[in-house]
């Protein structure tokens, strides 16, 4: 996955929550732009409720899609 594509999702005004789907089947929901940090080859997703983070290699991100509004 291209880092710029994910950055575009993070910079949308107004922000729309989105989900990333990994090659191993994992999904990670990004509900706030400050909960994700995109670097050159990886992305860090922070889960504030659990006080944990996940590092995802961009090469293993298969898709990025907007979350459906509830």
Image: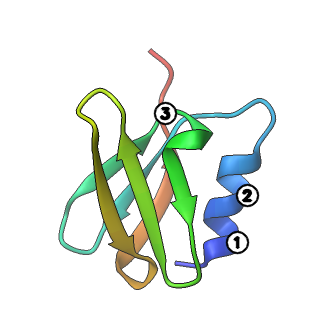
Where 61 falls versus 19 (above or below)? Answer: below
Q: Horizontally, is 17 left or right of 13 in the view? A: left
**Quadrant position of residue 54:** bottom left
Q: Position of residue 36 (x, y in %)?
A: 51, 51
**Quadrant position of residue 15:** top right
Determine which residue is flagged by label 2.
Answer: 8
Other residues around mark 2 within 10 Å, as few (<14) / some (14–19) / many (≥20): few
Q: Horizontally, is 27 left or right of 45 in the view? A: left
Instruction: Choose between 66 and 7: the one closer to the eye.
Output: 7
What's the residue at 50%, 84% (across, down)?
A: 41
Q: CA distance from mark 3 to mark 2?
A: 15 Å
Query: Mark 3 vs mark 1: which is more N-terminal?
Result: 1
Q: Quadrant of the C terminus?
A: top left
Cβ atoms at labels 3 and 2 below 8 Å apart: no
Q: Position of residue 40 (x, y in %)?
A: 59, 83
Determine which residue is flagged by label 1.
Answer: 4
What's the residue at 57%, 66% (across, down)?
A: 38
Other residues around mark 1 within 10 Å, as few (<14) / some (14–19) / many (≥20): few
What's the residue at 77%, 29% (across, down)?
A: 14
Q: Position of residue 61 (x, y in %)?
A: 40, 72
Instruction: Choose between 34 and 28: the one closer to the eye.
Output: 34
Determine which residue is flagged by label 3.
Answer: 31
């Amino acid at each position: 996955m291209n880092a710029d594509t994910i950055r575009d999702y993070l910079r949308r005004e107004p922000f729309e929550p989105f989900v990333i789907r990994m090659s191993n089947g994992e999904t990670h929901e990004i509900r706030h732009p400050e909960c994700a940090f995109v670097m050159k080859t990886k992305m860090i997703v922070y889960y504030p409720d659990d006080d944990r983070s996940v590092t995802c290699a961009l090469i293993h991100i298969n898709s990025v899609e907007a979350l459906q509004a509830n």
